[in-house]
Amino acid sequence: MRKHLIICYLGLIIIAFFSLKVFAAEILLDDYQGGLSPKWEEKSFKGETLYEVTQEDTLRCIKATSHSSASGLSYKINYDTKNYPILNWLWKIDHILLKGNALKKDGDDYAARIYVVFPSLMFWKTRAINYIWANKLPRGKAVTNPFTKNSIMIAVESGESKTGLWIEERRNVFEDFRMHFGQDAPRVGAISIMTDTDNTGEEAIAWYGPIRILSLSRP
């Protein structure tokens, strides 16, 4: 009888272990079902972009509206991209910025962008990958941010052809960091979204769907 109980107990442990692995294959930042999670923190650089939870095309999301402003929402999260290399998200923009130019400081504005931040105790060594909906930079092109060499800008979308459409993106952050910084990534400290138009003085509207962090075991 005791042996049977031990076998059953071990079986439950194994089931729990594999259930945990399946659960841990995905980290969902926020589904916006209860409004904006308090884990989001607004960071303002110039003025304030309006971020509000809304329903757009049946999808709960964050709507961002910028009028010559630059502020973002940052979600603090600590994880290793070796275990969770994939960043997956949905986004949509109303239009690109006519004066936007990824190669110039006065053109460093985007209707939508997502940062993955890799903090350092020495703040000047903090690095970031900035996934942008580029204005003119060709899709797939990567350049150094005109304000800092510690931020790489990768054009995952570009131009007007897909404006008004929900686009799903999937990036291997671990590989992107290694390709552009020449070493393995340190731990992630935050993921941020930003719609900004302070340099160009234009207006922009974007929508950000749920952001997921995936292990390679998740298809």
Image (cartoon, grey):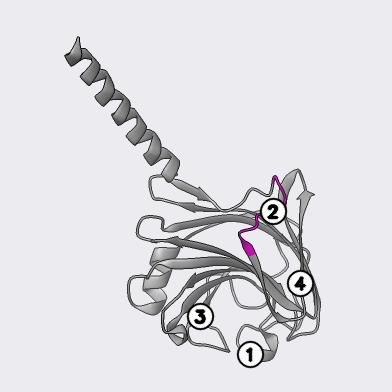
Mark 3 residue type: Ser
- Residue behind mark 1: 104
Q: Is residue 198 magenta?
A: no
Would you say the residues marked 2 and 4 are in contact, meaning their CB atoms lie under 8 Å apart?
Answer: no
Quarter residue 119 falls in = bottom left
Per the image, label 4 sits on a secondary structure element best described as loop
Give the mark nearer the N terminus: 4 vs 3.
4
Identified at 61% across, 71% down, the residue is 132
Would you say the residues marked 3 and 2 are in contact, meaning their CB atoms lie under 8 Å apart?
Answer: no
- Residue behind mark 3: 151
Q: Position of residue 160 (x, y in %)?
A: 73, 67
Per the image, label 1 sits on a secondary structure element best described as loop
Give the mark nearer the N terminus: 2 vs 4.
4
Mark 1: few/some/many CA within 10 Å (<14, 14-19, 20+): few
Q: Nearer the viewer, mark 2 or mark 4?
A: 4
> Can you say whether 159 is above or below 171 in the image?
below
Quarter residue 177 falls in = bottom left
Q: Is residue 34 magenta?
A: yes
Per the image, label 3 sits on a secondary structure element best described as strand
Q: Nearer the viewer, mark 3 or mark 1?
A: 3
- Residue behind mark 2: 166
In space, the residues marked 3 and 1 are separated at their CA atoms by: 14 Å
Visible in this render: residue 158? no
- Residue behind mark 4: 49
